[in-house]
Image (cartoon, rainbow, N blue to C red):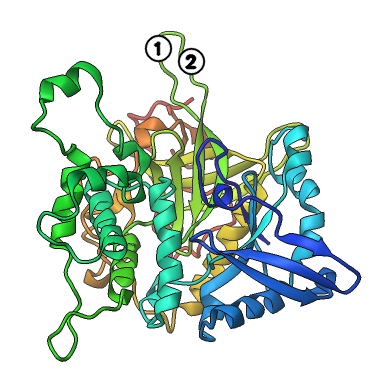
Amino acid sequence: MEGTEGNPGQPGPAERSHRSSVSSVGARAADVLVYLADDSVVPLAVENLPSLSAHELHRAVREVLQLPDAALDVFALWLVSPLLEVQLKPKHQPYKLGRQWPELLLRFTDAPDDDVAMDEPSLQFRRNVFFPKWRELQIRDEEVLRLLYEEAKGNVLTARYPCDVEDCEALGALVCRVQLGPYQPGQPAACTLRDKLDSFLPAHLCKRSHGLFAALRGRGARVGTGEQGLLNAYRRVKEAVGSDGAHEASLGSHYRAYLLKCHELPFYGCAFFHGEVDKPAQGILHRGGRKPVIVAISLEGVHVIDSREKHVLLGLRFQELSWDHTSPEEEEPVLWLEFDGDTEGLPVNKLLRIYSKQAELMSGLIEYCIELNQAAEPTAPQESAPSPHSAADPSLPPTQRPKLRRQSSVVCSRLQHLSTIDYVEDGKGIKRVKPKRSTSFFSRQLSSGQRGYTVVQPTDSLEQG
């Protein structure tokens, strides 16, 4: 089982369709509601629901939607509530897992007992975490593309996928094209676009100015910064041209363009988990505390995202980390990530603690993603899966060299906002430095020939503690 926990303070897919998916249960038949990414519902009348597998329900949904057989790999069934999100394996029995939902919440969340008692999951048809992006490029079926587009759009609008303003405008422009048709000079009117702005841009880019500053802008400044950028990007959206030279009426090319833009986000297609990390000590009292984070895990790697600021704190490919999880009886479960970094210009090995009751789920998902990648290596095409802190590594072959990132991009790592433990090996043993090391604590890592981080040699200038 793969599970992800949404951030209760952030609206996401779990909150769009939160209601029971089983409307009635009898001795033989039941009406099951399966929710799609656009909030539409697929009603199914099924026999013997308690013994029905996720694979059988998946097939029933595909038949109703008339999706091609390829959709079997593209999508999965999920049990989703505001407290927990779980991707089901084909052999899982959704009804039985739904009955066990309170036990899952107690094991994998910190939700209060009252919330656990009231929570009820819905059954959703969503993108499979284990479906690689390169295969998504081969999809031609428009309905499959539409479902992927709707899910990606929802994640962008709710800031589950943090995006730079430029990217939000480019993505919003494609949504304008899908919903409003081709751009026409003078259309849509600024007021029309403003009324629907939250359908095109994340909420934090839709804030309007009020009071003195709005008055100082005058009546001539009718279109806000986000609106003007969106209009400019909408104007630049290109129309697909058919073999006869005419513009194609199909929306498939725009769905594909939206997904291709999302592919530039290193956390596209990931599973989400909730946790906390230590803040760096600040002030004369060296007060730290913790900050809430979302841990996003995909086939490409692990990203730690600041839940409040909506930007990446740390992004690592699997080749760049070692990991483990601990669940001591009297302490909080922890996912440990080890990776290379530097302290005051000197190379060190860093260790990050992520406190989460889902540490076990995250560790298992990382291990399974690595196994899938290694099994697919001989046949899968090379992908550029850039790591934010290795954006200009000349040692990478040209086909693997990541794209340069914008300075201060929300997808770049912000290690200065993290509190890590740093180690170095001095020849006698591993010692902690202020705040380095070469030998990993953990056995869970890629083989030494595939690892991306290097041996760190101690220097006299390092202060050991």
Q: Quadrant of the N terminus?
A: bottom right
Q: Position of residue 422 (x, y in %)?
A: 45, 35
- Which residue shows up at 60% across the image and 47% down it? 5
Amino acid carrying mark 2 in the image: Arg
Kind of element beneath mark 1: loop
- Which residue shows up at 16% across the image and 39% down it? 223
Q: What residue would you read off at disc 1?
A: 283
Q: Is 135 in front, or is 231?
A: 231
Task: Tell me the tag on residue 218.
Answer: none
Q: In the picture provided, is 154 more to the left or to the right than 103?
A: left
Instruction: Tell me whether circle 2 and circle 1 mark residues in contact (CB < 8 Å).
Output: yes
Number of marks in picture: 2
Task: Measure the alpha-carbon separation of dots 2 and 1.
Answer: 7 Å
Count residues near mark 2 (Cα–Cα under 10 Å), then give few for <14, some for 14-19, many for 20+: few
Q: In the picture provided, is 196 more to the left or to the right than 221?
A: right
Using the image, determine if residue 48 lies above or below residue 434.
below
Count residues near mark 1 (Cα–Cα under 10 Å), then give few for <14, some for 14-19, many for 20+: few
Q: Position of residue 159 (x, y in %)?
A: 40, 45
Q: Position of residue 256 (x, y in %)?
A: 32, 72
Work out whether residue 407 can be spotted: no
Amino acid carrying mark 1 in the image: Gly
Using the image, determine if residue 212 lies above or below residue 277.
above
Residue extending furthest toward the right: 27
- Which residue shows up at 67% across the image and 69% down it? 89
Which quadrant of the view contains residue 83? Answer: top right
Work out whether residue 364 can be spotted: yes
Kind of element beneath mark 2: loop
Q: In the picture provided, is 138 more to the left or to the right than 20?
A: left
Q: What residue would you read off at disc 2?
A: 287
Q: In the picture provided, is 215 more to the left or to the right than 137?
A: left
Q: Is 1 in front, or is 12?
A: 12
- Which residue shows up at 66% across the image and 79% down it? 60
